[in-house]
């Protein structure tokens, strides 16, 4: 009879558990890198939780790797297809150009030049038509701006001519010239002003004297009234 402490079932279970712990420890070491893994209680519940978390994380990493590889393959496939299509286009264009006569080459060059000048996105009639419409709109806008600039230029020219005429009139009109005897006239006006100021002061003194004399003696009416009383 098998010893219950050392039964094959328990041995297998212990081996499986040890393998699971090794997987969990390796996963934790990858997660923490150079940092030490924190201490935690090692029991069956913790093991089940960490196993589920590690499995989910590894599954997500695997999906990310698969997705990245799929994207890389798609990009490489697209590049290869694009290179093949570009090479095919060049071959077709070379063959087409080789088959064109002189008139066809001139027409092709004219079309390419027109497309470049118009800034069109393509050589189709829709793209060229839209570019012509846009160019026409820009042309009308430029003409309108030029008309406004021309009108402003004409106005400024007229104003400048008027200012020149006024400046010439100021230079040549005798009414705006300074009299040659202006210093003498200024001196004469200053002398006459002084004389007038002196006369004004004299007249003011005389008026004041008359006012004082009037208040000191009887008036003419008072003298005549006294003479009538005496008579």
Image (cartoon, grey):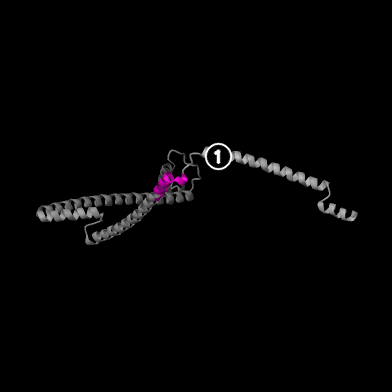
Provide residue 114's location: percent of width, then percent of height: 21, 55
In the foreground, 183 or 231: 231
Q: How many marks?
A: 1
The residue pinned by badge 1 equals: 186
Q: Residue at x 13, y 51 (%)?
A: 94
Provide residue 195's location: percent of width, then percent of height: 64, 40
Q: Residue at x 76, y 46 (%)?
A: 210
**Which residue is situated farthest in the front direction here?**
231
- Secondary structure under tag 1 reads helix
Q: Residue at x 22, y 61 (%)?
A: 125
Residue 41 sits above or below residue 230 on the image? above
* Residue 75 seen in the current view: yes
In the foreground, 90 or 165: 165
Residue 166 falls within the magenta-colored stretch: yes
Q: Residue at x 16, y 55 (%)?
A: 108
- Range covered by the magenta-colored residues: 162-176
**Which residue is situated farthest in the right direction here?**
230
In the foreground, 222 or 77: 222
- Assign the magenta stretch its main secondary structure: helix
Residue 30 falls within the magenta-colored stretch: no
* Residue 15 seen in the current view: no
Provide residue 211's location: percent of width, then percent of height: 77, 47
Left or right: 10 as drawn, with respect to 91: right
Provide residue 212's location: percent of width, then percent of height: 79, 45
Left or right: 147 as drawn, with respect to 46: left
Q: How packed is label 1: few (under 14 Cα within 10 Å), some, or many (20 or more)?
A: few
In the foreground, 35 or 123: 123
> Looking at the rendering, in which quadrant would you find the C terminus?
bottom right
Which of the 4 quarters of the picture holds residue 202?
top right
């Amino acid at each position: 009879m098998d010893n219950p402490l050392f039964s094959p079932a328990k041995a297998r279970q212990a081996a499986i558990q040890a393998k699971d712990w090794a997987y969990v420890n390796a996963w934790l070491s990858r997660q923490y890198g150079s940092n030490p893994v924190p201490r935690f209680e090692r029991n069956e519940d913790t093991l089940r939780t960490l196993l589920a978390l590690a499995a989910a994380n590894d599954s997500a990493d695997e999906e990310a790797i698969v997705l990245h590889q799929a994207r890389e393959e798609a990009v490489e496939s697209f590049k290869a297809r694009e290179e093949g299509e570009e090479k095919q286009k060049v071959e077709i264009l070379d063959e087409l150009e080789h088959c064109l006569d002189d008139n066809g080459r001139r027409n092709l060059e004219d079309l390419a030049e027109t497309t470049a000048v118009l800034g069109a996105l393509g050589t189709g009639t829709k793209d060229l038509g839209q570019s012509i419409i846009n160019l026409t709109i820009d042309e009308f806008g430029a003409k309108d701006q030029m008309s406004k600039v021309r009108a402003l230029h004409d106005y400024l020219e007229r104003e400048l001519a008027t200012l020149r005429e006024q400046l010439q009139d100021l230079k040549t009109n005798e009414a705006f010239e300074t009299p040659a005897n202006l210093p003498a006239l200024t001196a004469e006006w200053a002398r006459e002003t002084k004389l007038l100021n002196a006369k004004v002061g004299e007249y003011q003194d005389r008026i004041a004297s008359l006012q004082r004399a009037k208040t000191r003696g009887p008036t003419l009416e008072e003298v005549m009234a006294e003479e009538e009383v005496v008579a």
